[in-house]
């Protein structure tokens, strides 16, 4: 007899997932009727109900359809107002060889905060450096859904965390490499939020040769990246707010000077972004720049030597 809560979305919705991965999860279950719901890989917005049948895993397409002023979810010739209603129906009715009995167990994956993350968005989950979180769902490349020790659930920015293993003796927090000498890239896995952070890759002023060491509070770094930054359409333009002189041996790192305008071409989830500055392409740490939100702000730099070679033409915006 089925005994699951169809309204507990986090128990059965696995988000983006390949057909092969879903099959592997369900084939490890001996009981018929074990299931999960994943995103469709072929039609954006649709879902797939994956069910362990007798000797196979069946994949049932769920089409999300707009009908006049309402949305319905259609599977075969049946239509439902929402996914919980659909799942409740198939608790009592057979799909092929079985009704739905229970969601597949989710492999528990944990992450540890590399920076403080503070947000006023009610969909987000604020956390501190060193705090351990349980990953519920990997919704996007840059944003995942997670749960803290109090049971609170929300979205977290992927560049702010790293993998955490309960069975590992070494869960030191690694800071993204910023092109420095290699010093100060490991932060002890502590829950202290008031300690300063040792960073490589320039100082807050004019920078230091050879990837010198700068000290910033974790609170400052925690607020360096906005949610809109990770979802921003690229390429986009950003202003350098902290100087940086990379290690002389790192030929792909960009030298940054305050008020330079850099064309950001890629925001990698490891915190090392890519861009173009003064005709050179390379990488740089996201903590050293802030995006320019409108064209006029960048054009104001046209009289400055630092950014005269990097101000985009009006036609470049929105590309």
Image: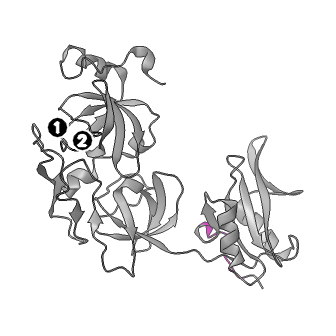
Residue 7 falls inside the magenta stretch: yes
Give the residue displayed 12% in from the left and 43% down from the top. Answer: 204
> Which residue range is magenta in the image?
3-9
Give the residue displayed 68% in from the left and 46% down from the top. Answer: 44
Residue 36 seen in the figure: no
- The quadrant of the rendering that contains the N terminus is bottom right
Q: Which residue is mark 2?
A: 288
Residue 6 falls inside the magenta stretch: yes
Q: Is 114 positioned to the left or the right of 192 in the image? A: right
Mainly helix, strand or loop, the magenta region? loop
Query: Between disc 1 and disc 2, whose residue precedes?
Result: 1
Q: Secondary structure at mark 1?
A: loop
Q: Position of residue 240 (x, y in %)?
A: 23, 34
Which of the numbered marks, if any, corresponds to residue 243? 1
Q: Position of residue 20 (x, y in %)?
A: 68, 64
Seen from the viewer's position, the closer of residues 123 and 293 is: 293
Which of the numbered marks, if any, corresponds to residue 262? none
Q: Is 43 positioned to the left or the right of 207 in the image? A: right
Q: Position of residue 30 (x, y in %)?
A: 73, 84
Q: Secondary structure at mark 2?
A: helix
Q: Residues within 10 Å of mark 2 (few under 14, many from 20)?
A: many
Seen from the viewer's position, the closer of residues 265 and 289 is: 265
Q: Is 59 positioned to the left or the right of 104 in the image? A: right
């Amino acid at each position: 007899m089925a005994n699951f809560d169809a309204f507990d979305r986090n128990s059965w919705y696995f988000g983006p997932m390949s057909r092969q991965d879903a099959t592997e999860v369900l084939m490890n279950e001996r009981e018929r009727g074990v299931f999960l719901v994943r995103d469709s890989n072929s039609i954006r917005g649709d879902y797939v109900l994956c069910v362990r049948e007798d000797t196979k895993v069946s994949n049932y397409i769920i089409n999300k359809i707009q009908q006049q002023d309402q949305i319905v979810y259609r599977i075969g010739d049946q239509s439902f107002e929402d996914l919980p209603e659909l799942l409740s129906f198939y608790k009592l009715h057979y799909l092929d060889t079985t009704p739905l009995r229970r969601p597949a167990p989710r492999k528990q994956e944990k992450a540890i905060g590399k920076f403080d993350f503070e947000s006023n968005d009610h969909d987000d989950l604020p956390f501190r450096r060193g705090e351990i979180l349980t990953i519920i769902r990997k919704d996007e490349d840059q944003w995942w859904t997670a749960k803290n020790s109090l049971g609170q659930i929300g979205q977290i920015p992927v560049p702010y965390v790293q993998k955490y293993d309960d069975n590992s003796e070494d869960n030191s927090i690694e800071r993204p490499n910023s092109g420095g000498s290699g010093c100060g890239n490991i932060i002890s896995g502590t829950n202290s939020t008031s300690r300063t952070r040792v960073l490589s890759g320039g100082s807050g002023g004019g920078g230091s040769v050879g990837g010198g060491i700068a000290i910033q509070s974790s609170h400052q770094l925690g607020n360096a990246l906005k949610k809109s930054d990770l979802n921003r359409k690229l390429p986009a333009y950003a202003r350098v707010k902290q100087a940086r002189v990379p290690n002389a041996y790192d030929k792909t790192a960009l030298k940054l000077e305050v008020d330079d305008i850099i064309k950001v071409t890629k925001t990698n989830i490891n915190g090392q972004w890519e861009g173009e500055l003064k005709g050179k392409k390379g990488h740089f740490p996201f903590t050293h720049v802030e995006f320019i939100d409108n064209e006029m702000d960048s054009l104001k730099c046209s009289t400055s030597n630092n950014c005269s070679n990097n101000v985009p033409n009006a036609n470049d915006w929105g590309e």
